[in-house]
Image (cartoon, grey):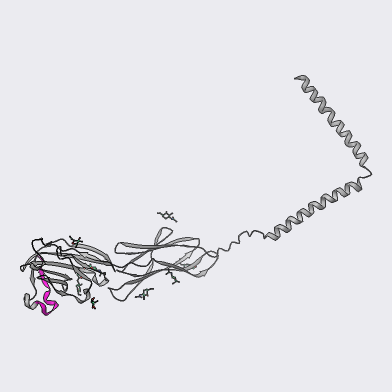
């Protein structure tokens, strides 16, 4: 890798941002690109490729941190900051020994490809590419169900899943009782470097209770929500338990009936049978005699035989 100043060096450097940019003519990939992932609002560190030995200092170096070849994020020469991009003002710091670039708080626009170039006495010591992926978290998906038609057999509904405020553009996926389903997805964003809102819609004919899941995936992250959708109108009249007063009334009626029959029986037995009681008694006695006699004889017979 060979890097050349894009314009005449030293004095002219203060004239404009473009002058700081170094053109690097790649002769093969000198250094492996590093990948850094970060979330909006966080503090991120982008590693450089050189550590200044303690015998030296930043004063003998020139360091460029640039983004996407075209803009200088931060540059140091002879120990002084010689450039800082407006968008990065008050958000960047560089470690004076290992030349790590710190950015805080992270913004969506910071996403991109960075490069650190270290020169000592106008000779390039090393350069390092760092790819920064910026992510913003999506809100937990919100699932709502709107019934559009309802009959005994089937409930037709529109299921909507929405999530907002994330980056980059997400994927939205779904499952219906663990079977994957496609959402009819719609994304909204002010620009390709603004947060996204995503909405998925699904038309569903529900014949029984179903479990629906909505997942939003972005940069390897995922957020999901599940909702149990109940078949609302199933037209089967469930066996309604009788109200308490009905139960009480039936109990009272039954008890009254039992009492009435008992009393009636007693009354009748006194009045109707008063004249035949003697006869009945004698018959009963006779029966008793008759039944007792064989019992006792049998009992004695058994015991005697033992
Ligand atoms: C650079 O130094 C800072 C301390 O200022 C440390 O936190 C960071 O891990 C170092 N980075 C590398 C790549 O050595
Ligand atoms: C660099 O920036 C230009 C213009 O801003 C853009 O067209 C290009 O895609 C960017 N390249 C990378 C690698 O981000
Ligand atoms: C950076 O901070 C200084 C002082 O703290 C302030 O005056 C300036 O407006 C800030 N710049 C930006 C771009 O926030
Ligand atoms: C973020 O930057 C990387 C590296 O340039 C690029 O590959 C990626 O597409 C960018 N992401 C977005 C959402 O633009
Ligand atoms: C989900 O969406 C519904 C309808 O748009 C809304 O009333 C409700 O507040 C939302 N819930 C959450 C947690 O955002
Ligand atoms: C779906 O799958 C998960 C695990 O794979 C299981 O725990 C769950 O019971 C399944 N649900 C249904 C409705 O099959
Ligand atoms: C995304 O949704 C949020 C919250 O619902 C809203 O405030 C914002 O305006 C929406 N953004 C776009 C680009 O529609
Ligand atoms: C749901 O049922 C209606 C008729 O009852 C039919 O027109 C519609 O296509 C069905 N939708 C789905 C998603 O099966």
Residue 207 lies, in percent from the top left, at 50, 62
25 is within the stretch colored magenta: yes
Q: In which quarter of the image is the C terminus?
A: top right
Q: What stretch is highlighted in magenta?
A: 13-26
Q: In this view, does 62 lie above or below 251?
A: below
Give percent across and percent down for residue 43: 25, 66
Q: Which residue is drawn at 92% across and 42% down?
A: 277
Specify the quadrant that holds the N terminus. bottom left
Q: Nearer the viewer, residue 130 or 215?
A: 130
Report how many numbered discs are placed on residues in the image: 0
Which image quarter: residue 122?
Answer: bottom left
Is 163 magenta? The answer is no
Residue placed farthest to the top in the image? 305
Judge by depth and name the residue closer to the eye, 244 or 102: 102
Looking at the rendering, which quadrant does residue 237 occupy?
Answer: bottom right
Identity of the residue drawn at 73% across and 55% down:
251
Along the line of sight, the residue nearer the viewer: 210 or 7: 7
Q: Residue furthest right?
A: 275
Q: Where is residue 60 in the image (x, y as percent from the top left)?
A: 7, 67
Q: Residue at x 89, y 34 (%)?
A: 285
């Amino acid at each position: 890798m060979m890097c050349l100043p894009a314009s005449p060096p030293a004095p002219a450097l203060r004239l404009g941002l473009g002058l700081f940019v170094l053109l690097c003519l790649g002769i093969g990939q000198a250094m492996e690109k590093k990948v850094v992932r970060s979330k909006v609002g966080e503090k991120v560190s982008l590693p450089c490729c050189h550590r200044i030995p303690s015998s030296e200092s930043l004063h003998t170096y020139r360091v460029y941190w640039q983004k996407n070849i075209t803009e200088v994020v931060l540059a140091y020469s002879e120990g002084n900051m010689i450039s800082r991009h407006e968008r990065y003002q008050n958000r960047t710091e560089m470690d004076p020994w290992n030349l790590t670039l710190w950015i805080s708080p992270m913004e969506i626009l910071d996403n991109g490809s960075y490069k650190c170039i270290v020169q000592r006495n106008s000779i390039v010591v090393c350069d390092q590419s760092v790819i920064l992926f910026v992510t913003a978290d999506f809100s937990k998906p919100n699932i709502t169900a709107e019934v559009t038609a309802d009959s005994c057999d089937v409930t037709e509904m529109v299921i909507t899943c929405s999530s907002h405020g994330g980056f980059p553009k997400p994927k939205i996926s779904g499952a219906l009782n663990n079977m994957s389903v496609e959402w009819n997805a719609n994304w909204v964003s002010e620009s390709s470097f603004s947060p996204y809102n995503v909405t998925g819609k699904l038309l569903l004919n529900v014949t029984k209770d179903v479990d629906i899941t909505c997942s939003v995936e972005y940069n390897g992250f995922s957020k999901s929500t599940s909702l149990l959708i109940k078949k609302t109108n199933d037209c089967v009249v469930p066996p309604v338990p009788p109200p308490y007063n009905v139960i009480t009334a039936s109990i009272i009626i039954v008890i009254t009936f039992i009492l009435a029959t008992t009393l009636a029986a007693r009354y009748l037995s006194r009045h109707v049978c008063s004249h035949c009681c003697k006869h009945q008694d004698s018959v009963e006695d006779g029966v008793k005699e008759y039944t007792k006699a064989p019992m006792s004889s049998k009992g004695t017979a058994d015991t005697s035989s033992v």
